[in-house]
Amino acid sequence: MQHEKTTVIVSRYGMGTAPEELSLTLVKNYLVLIREENMVPAYICFYADGVRLTIEGSPVIEELKALESSGCKILICKTCLNFYALADKVAVGTVATMVDIIGAQDNSTKVITI
């Protein structure tokens, strides 16, 4: 079941303030479980360092592709991609403006930041 009014915000390369290995394990588990538990959000928005999770070689690309195929819209901040010189390495999702990300948040009844 897709949660049509939920947006998840990802602004870090991983989840929490743990060491990178643990942080990446946590975000991977989160992405797997929201799909397995039929809690797919309408949007997942990536900005700041979080955009690195959407590029080639990311440890969560398969999980993000599975969520996208389940109907989740994945929005990636264009300004952030350009800042990190990663715009040509996007492997999943849609490059979006901050206006698009604000629109996703505005259309949601719940915004979750991980």
Image: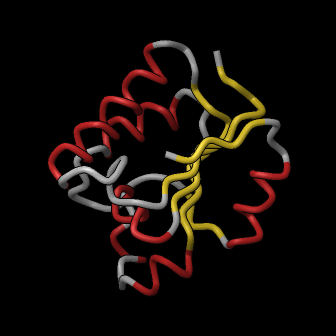
Residue displayed at 37% across by 82% down: 84
Q: Residue visible at 40% across and 60% down?
A: 12
> Is 27 placed above or below 9 here?
above
Query: Horizontal placement of 46 versus 14: left or right?
Result: right
Decide: is 46 above or below 2.
below
Give the total of numbered labels: 0
Query: Farthest residue in the front direction?
Result: 17
Q: Nearer the viewer, residue 59 or 112?
A: 112
Residue drawn at x 22%, y 47% is: 59
x and y percentages locating residue 44 in the rendered image: 57, 46
**Is 98 left or right of 35, judged from the image as shown?**
right
Task: Return the x and y of residue 73 as percentages of the image width and height.
Answer: 62, 44
For the point 38% across and 57% down, the residue is 54
Q: Viewer-proximal residue, 15 or 75? A: 15
- Residue 26 location (% of width, % of height): 29, 37
The quarter of the picture where the N terminus appears is top right
Dividing the picture into quarters, in which one does residue 108 lie? top right
Where is residue 113 shown, x and y percent of the image?
56, 47
Q: Please name the colour scheme applied to the rendered image.
A: secondary structure
Q: Is residue 13 above or below residue 81?
A: above
